[in-house]
Image: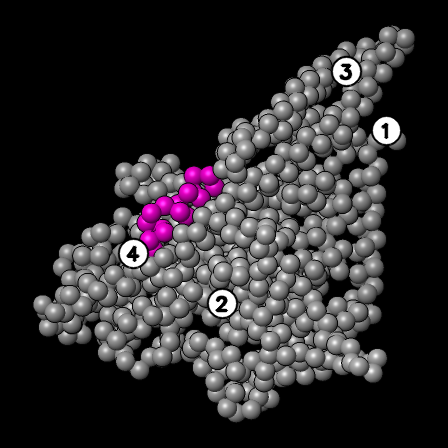
């Protein structure tokens, strides 16, 4: 077959799939009673309370609600309730569900079934089974923490995140959120440091609240609301794109004539098939207790977003993972593939995951909510300033927490926040910061005089301030929004960094406040001094201009802010002295654990790029060059016929020359890519990662440029890969 019928039969298949879906949607009635289904597959606090003996419930509640250490004696009773509840729901198996350092989630299923002596079987699940599991840890990355001779790791129940049931047509499984550690207790996952960071924050924030006279607060936690962007393409196209199949993104593809320039997609009406898919995703998520709230089209064609209602960070992070899993699973049911990669299509907007972050306590709903009274506002200013201080002091860590091969395509391009970490707080709060620096604020820009008898501290306008879409960290009224997180990344790590850095800032500010209070009896005055002193040190982090502009790059440099453009620039921040000190001080990660993480991230970076380069080479050699040659052959045949018929076909000669030239360059370029990619650049992981980043990636980009040029020359019916136009606009 000389032409790419494979591509055109995809169009046919897409059309058929749509017909089937329309028929299916017409036949079953889709009704959703949210109140009835919400949380039906989630072992909620209410269900536990209802089914557990009162004394056990009381003990467990202290752990779930107040972050108290788990009393192992409750495990047996909880196990009984869990098994009963799960088997009632049709579950035959259970799994410890955890977040290994791959960034995805992992599970190993065990059956409830235990044979009895009479040759039959009973179902069994003990406190021991609940508390501890032993997956085959050797297949998960450990970055040298777990030598092969002691390959075992264990998972341990996290009672603060509810268990849930995942259904499949053929059976159901009880999933128990767990942490994953080595036998020596070193963390091998993302959840352990997240939980430790929540505890660090809790301790420091409680201490600070005491200074504000709040002795009765029992806990402080961070909250997370994670918006998820994603692309959908028809699976027929997916199967015909080896690049998307192996790397999650297009390694080739000329930009379509109609891209996102028209801006008609954002908030536009959602196509029918997509809407059916979204409704089913929502239904599934509701059933496991994930409170998804908003759905809409995103900026690029084929791009969409889901956002949930925020929850306590640990639960929200688990729910974020469930959201990604559900998006991927459900897409297949609708003949679609969900692409979570940060940059599936060059030249179009990439996908991010805005991580909304705030603090909540047993008493205050939101510690970053500007209050009604001056007293509340002092407290608001304290925590708000502590967060800014954390961002300033640990910009490098925050940048490192979102570093990945995929996110490198986004950060620094003019669509996502720049690689420079800065904070946007809005005009009115900036004004207040200025006044504090000048020795006490007395007015707010819009709200007129603040007076209220307070000499030093202002009344804070509620929900003031514009949005600045170019800022990597924006204060949006009552929360910070960390916009640099990549769409495919785990939110656990960026949240861990924020929690830990803020714990450090609160600690430091509390110590200073205590010292000031020892000299100065007036609390407001002391706090005013502290805030002034703090802003004098950190206000370089505030930026309200255009983060995409050239001037900002220069100004940020003049301010001494970090500009870590790529993953390779950013990752070393994880293990520098300042970071190690922070993590060790608050018992979030040891130096050894940090070293292991650095190694794992570098390895993942290396592997990802290595696969991309291999796929590029493969597709060029086996699909793209052959297509060019066939087309060239066809032009040359015309040329020959011109000679025998006497027809003037000289234009075909020019065309043949063009195609031939690009083909020649492409062949040279792909040879070079293959060579540098197989060289690896050294024996150690950092050497390999460096080589991939510095040498291989630029060669890959050159190959792509030539291949995309060829795509524009070769006849459409010869081109083997579904085009951007097809993938993005056929829905
Ligand atoms: P936008 O669409 O402009 O980003 P939204 O008001 O829709 O802003 O909120 C975005 C996300 O922020 C939602 O997922 C929401 O749950 C989350 N969010 C709101 N308040 C908080 C909070 N206190 N802590 C964490 N996340 C929050
Ligand atoms: Mg947002």
Q: Position of residue 464 (x, y in %)?
A: 34, 63
Q: Nearer the viewer, mark 4 or mark 3?
A: 4
SS for dot 4: helix
First in sequence, mark 2 or 4: give its number: 2
Q: Are marks 1 and 3 in contact (CB under 8 Å)?
A: no
Q: Residue 389 has which mark?
A: 4
Q: Nearer the viewer, mark 2 or mark 4?
A: 2
**Rendered residue at 38%/79% (across/down):** 362
SS for dot 3: helix
Q: Position of residue 559 (x, y in %)?
A: 27, 42
Q: Give the CA separation, mark 2 to mark 4.
A: 23 Å
Q: Residue 652 has which mark?
A: 3
Residue on which disc 2 sits: 314
Whether 711 is drawn above or below 557: the answer is above
Q: For the magenta stretch, what is the residue range?
A: 567-582
Report the predominant secondary structure element of the magenta stretch.
Answer: helix
* Residue 314 in the figure: left or right of residue 95: left
Front residue of 68 and 350? 68
Q: Give the CA separation, mark 1 to mark 2.
A: 55 Å
């Amino acid at each position: 077959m000389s032409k790419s019928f494979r591509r055109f039969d995809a169009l046919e298949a897409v059309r058929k799939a749509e017909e089937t879906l329309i028929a299916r949607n017409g036949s079953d009635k889709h009704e959703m009673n949210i109140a009835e289904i919400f949380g039906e597959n989630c072992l909620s606090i209410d269900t536990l309370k209802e089914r557990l003996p009162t004394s056990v419930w009381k003990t467990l509640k202290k752990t779930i609600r107040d972050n108290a250490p788990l009393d192992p004696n409750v495990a047996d009773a909880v196990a009984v309730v869990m098994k009963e509840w799960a088997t009632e729901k049709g579950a035959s198996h259970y799994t410890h569900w955890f977040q290994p350092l791959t960034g995805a989630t992992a599970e190993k299923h065990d059956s409830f079934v235990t044979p009895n002596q009479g040759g039959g079987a009973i179902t069994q699940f003990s406190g021991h089974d609940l508390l501890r599991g032993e997956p085959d840890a050797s297949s998960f990355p450990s970055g040298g923490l777990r030598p092969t001779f002691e390959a075992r790791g264990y998972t341990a129940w996290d009672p603060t995140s509810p268990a849930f049931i995942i259904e499949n047509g053929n059976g159901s499984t009880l999933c128990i959120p767990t942490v994953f550690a080595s036998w020596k207790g070193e963390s091998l996952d993302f959840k352990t440091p997240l939980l430790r960071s929540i505890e660090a924050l809790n301790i420091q924030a409680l201490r600070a609240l005491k200074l504000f006279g709040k002795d009765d607060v029992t806990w402080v936690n961070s909250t997370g609301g994670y918006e998820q962007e994603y692309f959908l393409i028809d699976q027929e196209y997916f199967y015909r794109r080896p690049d998307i199949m192996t790397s999650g993104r297009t390694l080739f593809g000329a930009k379509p004539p109609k891209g996102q320039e028209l801006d008609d997609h954002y908030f536009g009406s959602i196509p029918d098939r997509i809407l059916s898919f979204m409704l089913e995703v929502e239904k599934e998520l509701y059933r496991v207790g994930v409170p998804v709230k908003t759905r809409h089209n995103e900026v690029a064609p084929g791009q969409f977003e889901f956002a949930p209602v925020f929850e306590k960070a640990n639960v929200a992070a688990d729910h974020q993972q469930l959201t990604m899993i559900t998006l991927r699973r459900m897409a297949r049911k609708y003949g679609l593939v969900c692409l979570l990669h940060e940059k599936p299509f060059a030249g179009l907007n990439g996908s991010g995951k805005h991580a909304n972050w705030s603090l909540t306590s047993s008493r205050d709903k939101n510690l970053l909510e500007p209050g009604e009274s001056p007293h509340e506002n002092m407290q608001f200013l304290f925590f708000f300033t502590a967060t800014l201080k954390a961002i300033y002091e640990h910009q490098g860590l925050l940048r490192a927490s979102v570093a990945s091969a995929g996110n490198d395509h986004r950060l620094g391009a003019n669509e996502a926040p720049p690689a420079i970490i800065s904070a946007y707080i809005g005009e009115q709060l900036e004004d207040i910061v200025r006044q504090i620096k000048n020795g006490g604020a007395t007015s707010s820009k819009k709200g007129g005089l603040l007076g209220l008898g307070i000499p030093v501290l202002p009344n804070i306008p509620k929900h003031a301030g514009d949005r600045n879409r170019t800022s990597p960290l924006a204060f949006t009224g009552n929360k910070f929004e960390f916009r640099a997180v990549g769409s495919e990344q785990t939110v656990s790590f960026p949240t861990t960094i924020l929690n830990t850095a803020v714990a450090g800032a609160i600690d430091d500010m509390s110590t200073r406040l205590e010292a000031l209070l020892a000299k100065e009896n007036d609390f407001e005055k002391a706090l005013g001094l502290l805030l002034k002193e703090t802003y004098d040190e950190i206000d370089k982090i505030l930026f309200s201009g255009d983060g995409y502009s050239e001037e900002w790059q220069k100004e940020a440099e003049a301010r001494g802010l970090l500009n870590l453009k790529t993953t390779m620039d950013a990752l070393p921040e994880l293990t520098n002295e300042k970071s190690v000190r922070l993590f060790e001080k608050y018992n979030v990660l040891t130096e050894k654990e940090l070293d292991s993480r650095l190694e794992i991230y570098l390895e993942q970076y290396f592997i990802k790029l290595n696969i991309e380069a291999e796929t590029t080479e493969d597709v060029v050699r086996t699909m793209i060059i052959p297509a060019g040659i066939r087309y060239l052959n066809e032009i040359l045949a015309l040329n020959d016929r011109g000679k025998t018929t006497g027809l003037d076909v000289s234009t075909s000669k020019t065309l043949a020359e063009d195609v031939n030239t690009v083909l020649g360059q492409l062949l040279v370029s792909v040879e070079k890519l293959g060579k540098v990619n197989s060289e690896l650049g050294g024996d150690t992981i950092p050497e390999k990662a460096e080589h991939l980043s510095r040498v291989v990636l630029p060669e890959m980009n050159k190959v792509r440029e030539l291949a995309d040029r060829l795509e524009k020359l070769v006849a459409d019916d010869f081109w083997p890969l579904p085009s951007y136009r097809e993938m993005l606009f056929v829905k």
